[in-house]
Image: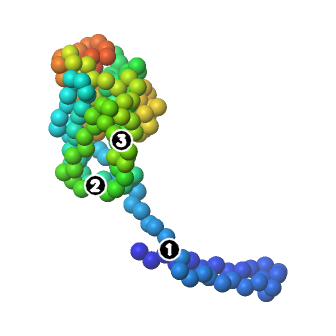
């Protein structure tokens, strides 16, 4: 990629000034964070026995700066509204990562330099009797409204999806938000 710039001095006093373009300037041009869609990641392992742990596989290459959010919140009785009361975790890629990369989080792990936002996020805990996890992009603050949220992957274990939503179970998200 070549970037060029042309600048001119104009105006009544333009002849009193001159413009010197410096040499040796460098710039970094970085790819934008990757936008993920449903199916671009998959959970390959989940453990709700202390310590909580999960692993995902990237089914699409991602660029540095790509943020992927995780929550054990489910959906309420409307099936288009996210539940509250549980936690969030974010992974932000600190390098470009190829297809097939496995990302693993373990509660209590050392997170320095890993891209994970927390080693023990508040209220993010899998129930041994059943829970759910959703992977998404978008602001965690918008989970309830689902505004600007892209669901990438979801799972429910330990119990069938139900007509009521609780901490250990969820409704199937409405296809309108998938």
Identify the residue at horizontal 41%, vertical 21% (top origin).
84
Identify the residue at horizontal 79%, vertical 87% (top origin).
15
Which mark identifies residue 14? none
Sequence-wise, which precedes: disc 2 or disc 1? 1
> In the rendered image, which residue does mark 3 sit on?
111
Residue 108 found in image quarter: top left
Determine whether 42 is above or below 61 in the image.
above
Is residue 170 in sight in this rendering? Answer: yes
The residue carrying pointer 2 sits among few (fewer than 14), some (14 to 19) or many (20 or more) residues within 10 Å by Cα, namely some
Determine whether 42 is above or below 126 in the image.
below
The residue carrying pointer 1 sits among few (fewer than 14), some (14 to 19) or many (20 or more) residues within 10 Å by Cα, namely few
The single residue placed furthest to the top in the displayed view is 164
The single residue placed furthest to the right in the displayed view is 12
Asked whether 112 or 135 is in front, the reply is 112
Asked whether disc 2 touches disc 3, contact meaning CB atoms under 8 Å apart, the reply is: no
Sequence-wise, which precedes: disc 2 or disc 3? 2
Question: What is the quadrant of the N terminus in the image?
Answer: bottom left
Asked whether 40 or 97 is in front, the reply is 97
Which mark identifies residue 97? 2
Determine whether 26 is above or below 67 in the image.
below
Asked whether disc 3 touches disc 1, contact meaning CB atoms under 8 Å apart, the reply is: no
Q: What is the C-alpha distance between the residues marked 2 and 3?
A: 18 Å
Helix, strand or loop at disc 1? loop
Identify the residue at horizontal 37%, vertical 52% (top origin).
94
Determine whether 105 is above or below 18 in the image.
above
> In the rendered image, which residue does mark 1 sit on?
26
Identify the residue at horizontal 72%, vertical 85% (top origin).
18
Residue 99 position in % (x across, y down): 21, 53
Residue 163 position in % (x across, y down): 26, 13
């Amino acid at each position: 990629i070549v970037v060029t710039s042309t600048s001119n001095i104009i105006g009544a006093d333009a002849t009193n000034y001159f413009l010197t373009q410096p040499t040796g300037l460098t710039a970094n041009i970085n790819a934008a964070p990757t936008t993920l869609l449903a199916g671009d990641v998959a959970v390959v392992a989940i453990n709700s026995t202390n310590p909580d742990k999960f692993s995902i596989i990237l089914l699409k290459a991602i660029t540095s700066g790509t943020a992927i959010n995780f929550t054990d919140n489910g959906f309420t009785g409307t099936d288009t509204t996210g539940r509250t009361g549980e936690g969030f975790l974010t992974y932000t890629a600190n390098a470009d990562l190829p297809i097939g990369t496995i990302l693993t989080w373990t509660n209590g792990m050392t997170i320095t330099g890993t891209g994970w936002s927390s080693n023990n996020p508040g209220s993010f805990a899998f129930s041994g009797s059943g829970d759910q996890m959703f992977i998404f992009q978008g602001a965690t603050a918008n989970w309830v409204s689902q505004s600007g949220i892209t669901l990438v992957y979801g799972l429910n274990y330990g119990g069938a999806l139900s007509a009521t939503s609780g901490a250990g179970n969820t409704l199937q998200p409405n296809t309108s938000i998938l």
